[in-house]
Amino acid sequence: MVRREFVDRHIGPSGANISTMLHELGYSNLEEFIDAVLPDSIKLHDTFGKVLPTPISEVDVIKELKSRARENIINHSFIGMGYYGTVTPPVVLRNVLENPAWYTAYTPYQPEISQGRLEALFAFQTMVSDLTGLPICNASMLDEGTAAAEAMTLARRSSQADDSAIFLIDSRVHPQTQAVVLTRAKPLNIDARIVDLTSHDNFENCFGVLLQYPDTFGSLPDFSDVISKVHAGNGLVIMATDLLALTLIKSPGEWGTDIAVGSAQRFGVPMGFGGPHAGFLAVRSGLERSLPGRLVGQSIDSHGNPALRLALQTREQHIRRDKA
């Protein structure tokens, strides 16, 4: 129930201001207003004292929680499409996830001195760059769909094509990625189209193409012909890929793609009811100035010692209040 004390404490004294607003809305008091706008399904008709059980000890709480947890049914997920169950080796759990040196390494709002945090991001960039075969990777993106949408806008900025040029999305790209890219393209007036690249042969007026490798069905198509035709028309090739698969298969850099995007979920990140997870965006040389997000680089400090720093960044990521 909404109490007058709560209103007084969080909204202000219940005086002329609230009365005037209620009068304009056609209600005589606050309780009548709350009763009208709050759905019956979420109304609390009893006080907390009557709803909550009798307090118990911490030991009994843990016992009760364990008892309820044993009733859970653990199912296997076969959804796929970029989301997969993972097994994280205990040695990684202990030395990375349970190592306080990584998650207590200064504050993220002091990027010029948070060496521990920057070291983790630098390692992430290095790993992604090695696996994708592209020299520069950012740190990082929200998820694979967001990375693909940012890659599309990067291609639009970097392409020499005119404003009428279109963006092609292979029909074998994960459906959630297709949806994000199409949504981002609409307000930007980008003509994005989903096509079957196994039969599509016209890339003349195209500033970019989005491929999935391995595709959403798990196959490994040969994109050599598509990539050469897109480049012949001065377009950019974006390849959404799987980092874990890249430990065994041909990398985007070896294919000759310009941009690689994807998710790091495969490397032991729990699915978390669908994410988001750590996305990535890697580019070939020449596109680094259009790279969205942050880029961690290695330099030297005032004493000549190696030091990590943000080489490229957006202004608002560490803005000082006194300089806002």
Image (cartoon, helix red, strand yellow):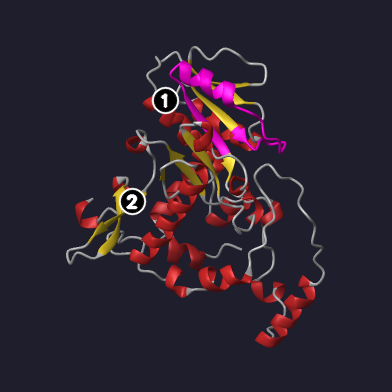
Q: At x 63% / y 64%, what residue is drawn?
A: 88
In the image, residue 293 lies at what x, y percent?
39, 45
Nearer mark to the viewer, of 1 and 2: 1
Toward the viewer: 89 or 271? 89
Residue segment shown in magenta: 212-240
The number of callouts visible is 2
Toward the viewer: 222 or 46? 222
Q: Is mark 2 on a helix, strand or loop?
A: helix
Residue pointed to by mark 2:
317
Q: In which quarter of the image is residue 179?
A: top right
In the image, residue 15 lies at what x, y percent?
41, 58
Q: Does residue 101 appear left or right of residue 131 in this picture?
A: left
Crowdedness near tag 1: few (<14), some (14–19) or many (≥20) residues, C-alpha within 10 Å:
many
Disc 1 to disc 2: CB gap under 8 Å: no
Q: How far apart are marks 1 and 2 (CA)?
A: 24 Å
Is-magenta flag for residue 237?
Answer: yes
> Of label 1 and label 2, which has the lower sequence position?
1
Q: At x 42% / y 56%, what residue is drawn?
A: 121
In the image, residue 162 lies at what x, y percent?
39, 14
Q: At label 2, which amino acid type do we have?
A: Gln
Q: Is residue 308 visible from the viewing direction of this image?
A: yes
Q: Does residue 205 appear left or right of residue 296 in this picture?
A: right
For residue 1, the mark is none
Q: At x 37% / y 48%, what residue is drawn?
A: 294
Q: Quadrant of residue 80?
A: top right
Q: In this view, does 202 lie above or below 144?
A: above
Q: At label 1, which amino acid type do we have?
A: Arg
Residue pointed to by mark 1:
156
Residue, far left: 302
Q: Is mark 1 on a helix, strand or loop?
A: helix
Q: Does residue 115 appear left or right of residue 232 in this picture?
A: left
